[in-house]
Image (cartoon, grey):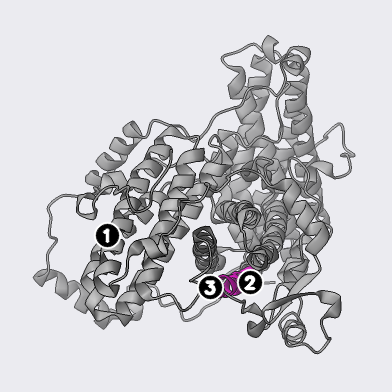
Amino acid sequence: MSTHADLGMNRTGVATSPRLTAEMIEGQKEFTPDLLGDERKIAASRSSSTREWTEPLGSVPPPPTLKGMVKSGLTALKGESPTLLIDKLGARLAFERTGVRLYEAMLAKLDAKGSFAGGPTRADIEGIVRDEYNHFQMLQEALEHLGADPTVMTPSADIEATITAGALAVMVEPRTDLAQCLESALTAELIDNDCWESIALLAKQAGQNDMAARFERALAQEQAHLLNVRRWIRVSQGLEEA
Amino acid sequence: MSIDLLKDRGTPLDQQRFTWKELVQAPYSKLDDDSFTRQRVILMNGIESDQLRFSHACSRMNRPLQVELARLRRAEQHQMTMVNWLNPADQTPLETTIGYEQIAIELTAAVALKEPDPYLAQVYRLGLLEDFDHMYRYSALMDRVEGKDPNNLLQSYTDILPGRPTPLHQRHPDDDIRAHYDRNTAELRTKLHAYTLVASEFQTHDYYMNVGPLYPDPVGRQLYAEIASVEEQHVTQYECIIDAGESWLEKLLLMQATEVYNYYSCVQSESNARIKAIWERFLDYELGHVRYVADMFERYERRDAAEVLNAKIPEPIDFVPHREFVRDVLRKEQNLTAVGEQFIDRAAEPADSASNLYRAQLNSEGTAADRVSAGYVWAPGSELSKRAPHTDPELTPHVHA
């Protein structure tokens, strides 16, 4: 399969229509902006709404049962705030769950369009799907262990979903190719790597050493995903040998 | 709190003023607000939207009314803006869609239970099972394409179960026509129910027609297309139950009363204090609109508005879960379909009926509703939470060679 876009009739640039563009610019001499100023007015307006809209996106709910909380040790969590850890674990869980679907979509892409020399094989992607799923399940167990509800969409989960909605959109779009999808995967893996590192540290800070050790093993897997994705992208661009 | 549609004069139209800052205020929280707050916002946007739609059609057909209608529409436009802009930007179109189907289910169930006319109650139950099935298909889409749990939006109020399968909702246009209530004998609440449902379904249709093409996954794009087509059928069926013999202004008066009825219902049940204040304000505005249109009605038609608004405002819509009622309808009426204005068991529908032939052709290359949800069983935290346990407890890394 091709790993780059072909020459075609792209009409988005001004060079396609120089005469029309010149007319547009000519018109600006006669019709000038109605107001003085620049984009700082938008920034001021954003700041104003940020001050006035005091309600947050959402919150982290209390553990479902006090009994569960005591039994599992949420009350014994050390560190700044137990809600920070729960919020971030909830975010990782949601991200890994979406990660399963993200790479399932990449499998469909690969099945439809094939790979390229030195690109990912079906088994490679299946391995990542399996890892994402295992991480999701491990996080479910981790949250349950802390007495938290793993089905909650935490504020950080919501934010990460908003950030990465584009990555998923590129992956499921029928017209994208595998190389373009790998760039989408790269975005996801970069975020994921940093966030796994954070939750391993947060778990350690909270005195959850076993949990932190498992998170570090998951981080090692995510690092492997990132290395692979980066390499496949370089190969697809001819920057590295297949 | 009791409302008298004609005696409570509300806020006069010329005192209904807004600023842009008021119109675009902080949205509700997708995560923390009760799901019925989202549902009420979606519903009231739909109610306002139908008002604008109808008023424009009325204006096109009635030159003498154009100035007064334009004045009224301006208030409705800005009310709709304030309501619709309460939806938060972190709520994706598909998440909002789950909200649309949830209010469709809970509202239709509430109305079906309160509707005194048994034929119309049956019309509502037919639509109910179809919106119920749409919820299942969209939920499968969200779970299987995005890896998200639709119940984050539903908050366990509403079931995620197959209803009457969506491919069977597709009917020949002739089979979407329903008998109508009689404007002279129907109770006021019957009329308000019908106007509420047609507005709600029309907005749902328009929403799907707008956001469907924004969905990147091809199965999702087709699912929106399939369900939008069913919503168009629902609009047809619900607009048919309204007596076409009502005059333009009689309809406009009933629509204003419908708005009062809906805002009144929202005020009764809203848990978000800031949003409740909006419902209260708009209830007063709509009472002002009833007065305004009643004056028009009396002036142009030389009839007493009390002939039309001839009863107390009905008991408010119950914005509560209707799980047992919906399941009961599902058990008894899953196989129901419509032939012309009548309802029959699908088993009695001839193989060469207009709707069977229509479906056979339209669905002949498969449906997204089937593809997206084959074997789908929702579980808390998504269907993935019930997949077989992982087989890699050590989570050892394997770098590609």
Residue A54 vs B139, above or below: the answer is above
Q: How many marks?
A: 3
Residue type, numbered disc 2 = Val
Q: Which quadrant of the structure image shows residue A207? A: top right
Residue B401 % position (x, y):
79, 48
Q: Are marks 1 and 2 on the same chain?
A: yes
Q: Which mark is residue B68?
A: none
Residue B262 vs B343, above or below: the answer is above
Label 1 Cα crowd, 10 Å radius (few <14 / some 14-19 / many 20+): some
The answer for how far apart the CA atoms under marks 1 and 2 are is 36 Å
The answer for how far apart the CA atoms under marks 3 and 2 are is 26 Å
Q: Which mark is residue B292?
A: 1
Residue type, numbered disc 3 = Asp
Please, which chain is the residue tagged with disc 3 on? B
Start and end of the magenta stretch? B226-241
**Which residue is label 3 attached to?**
B182
Q: Mark 2 or mark 3, which is nearer the start of the sequence?
A: 3
Q: Which mark is residue B230?
A: 2
Mark 1–mark 3 CB contact (< 8 Å): no
Front of the two marks 1 and 3: 3
| Magenta stretch: helix, strand or loop mostly | helix
**B398 with respect to A53 (left or right):** right
Element marked by disc 2: helix
Please, which chain is the residue tagged with disc 1 on? B
Residue at 15 percent of width and 49 percent of height = A37
Q: Mark 3 or mark 1, which is nearer the start of the sequence?
A: 3
